[in-house]
Amino acid sequence: MMLFWIITAVMIMAALLLLAPPLLLNRRSESLDRDQQNVVIARERLAELEAERDQGILDQAQFEKSKGELEQSLLLDLDQKGEERVETGSTGSGRLALAAVAVFVPALTLGLYAYLGTPELVEPINPALAEAHTTGGELPSVEQMMSALVERLEQNPEDAQGWYLLGRTNMALKEYANAVAAFEKVHQLVGDEPSLLLAWADAIAMNEQGNMLGKPAELIRKAVELVPDDTTALWLAGMVEAQAGDHQLAISYWERLAPQVQDDPQASARIAALISGSREKVERFGQKDAAVPETSTVETSAVVGKSVSVRVSLSSGLNGKVDPDEALFIYARALLGPKMPLAAARRKVRDLPLTLTLDDSGAMMPTMKISNFKQVIVGARVSRSGGAIAQSGDLNGEMAPVDVGADAIVDIVIDKVVP
């Protein structure tokens, strides 16, 4: 904001500087310059009269008469200019005019901007940021924002959008049970909204270790009936039917989906692999294979050999120096390139030591997955603030390079303090 007003002041000063010279010009000097010009002209005329007298064009009487008239005319002109100088008051009026301009130009400029412009954009008002600044200048942690959202929903339990946001946030934090409860509440408020049905089904399936049969299948099938061309609905519907053993029906969903994702090479390749895998099963088992209660083999095969297993522990020197409830982030990121995690998981310090697998299910973005890289950096970080972005004072440990798909478990020891 300060920079904006500095620039504004500089521009106004520049405008005043452009207007100042003509207003401060010494009018007395101008008048004197004109007087000097009149004298020069009179002298030239006198020289002409003298030449005419010498040449006999004028006699002495005529010369004296013309000379007298010339002198009288010059004196009269100088006397009139003197009166004008008294009336104009030299540069006083110029200074007065400049003072008026100095007052009215900024007033007029700022007034027009306030009326026609958008002064609120100079310093946008963000309630969340404003609250953060009033509480010490730091942005609230995810947990603090979650608590504020929960309090708001307690006061206004009919806020469907708030419940949906709570569900999506819990999904991002991998708190699947809480996400299921939030989406169920939204369903009570808004009914069978397709995007909600799909999000609810996804939360239930993730909470049940990927099992899409039962309630998730019911919700997804209903969503497909409501939006038969929705890409997410078709994708999940195919997964449901493949998991249920009806591979031919799964293929029909994915074939409807394929033209819609043809501009995305990775998605197209994934769909082609799913269709190919289901066709192999149709050839081997026939039209239907009912005995497929576990996660789809095709889905699992897509990440076999494309993961990293890690064992995370806390250095003995840091035991007793951390709170068991502090957030723990385990991540894998590219050895070279963007620092955004390719896969991540969130736990608590109390869960240490722990062993887990980082794969595409923990991808932050569809186009940035661990399966796309041969080597990665694997690390773990204790967040003192609870935020996903590293801050001074956090504790971490990393290992690099790590081969994606290696059989060995990577040991990560949290033993350093982020400066």
Image (spheres, rainbow, N blue to C red):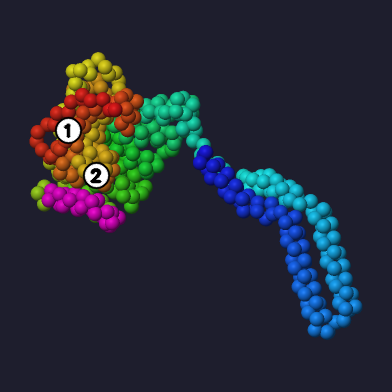
Residue 67 part of the magenta-drawn span: no
Q: What type is the residue that disc 1 sits on? A: Met
Bounds of the magenta span?
Answer: 258-281
Quarter of the image for the C terminus: give it: top left
Q: Secondary structure at mark 1?
A: strand
Q: Is residue 194 visible?
A: yes
Q: Is residue 176 visible?
A: no
Q: Position of residue 169 (x, y in %)?
A: 36, 33
Task: Check disc 2: other Cα within 10 Å, few if <14, some if 14-19, many if 20+.
Answer: few
Q: Is residue 42 above or below residue 21?
A: below
Disc 2 designates what residue?
337
Q: How many numbered discs, if any?
A: 2
The residue under the point 56% across, 46% down is: 10
Q: Is residue 255 toward the left or the right of residue 161 in the image? A: left
Alpha-carbon distance for marks 2 and 1? 17 Å
Q: Is residue 296 above or below residue 17?
A: above
Q: Secondary structure at mark 2?
A: loop
Between residue 391 and residue 281, name the one nearer to us: 391
Q: Is residue 101 toward the left or the right of residue 364 in the image? A: right
Between residue 150 and residue 283, name the one nearer to us: 150
Disc 1 designates what residue?
399
Main secondary-structure element of the magenta-colored stretch: helix
Res 216 → quadrant: top left
Q: Position of residue 325 (x, y in %)?
A: 30, 20
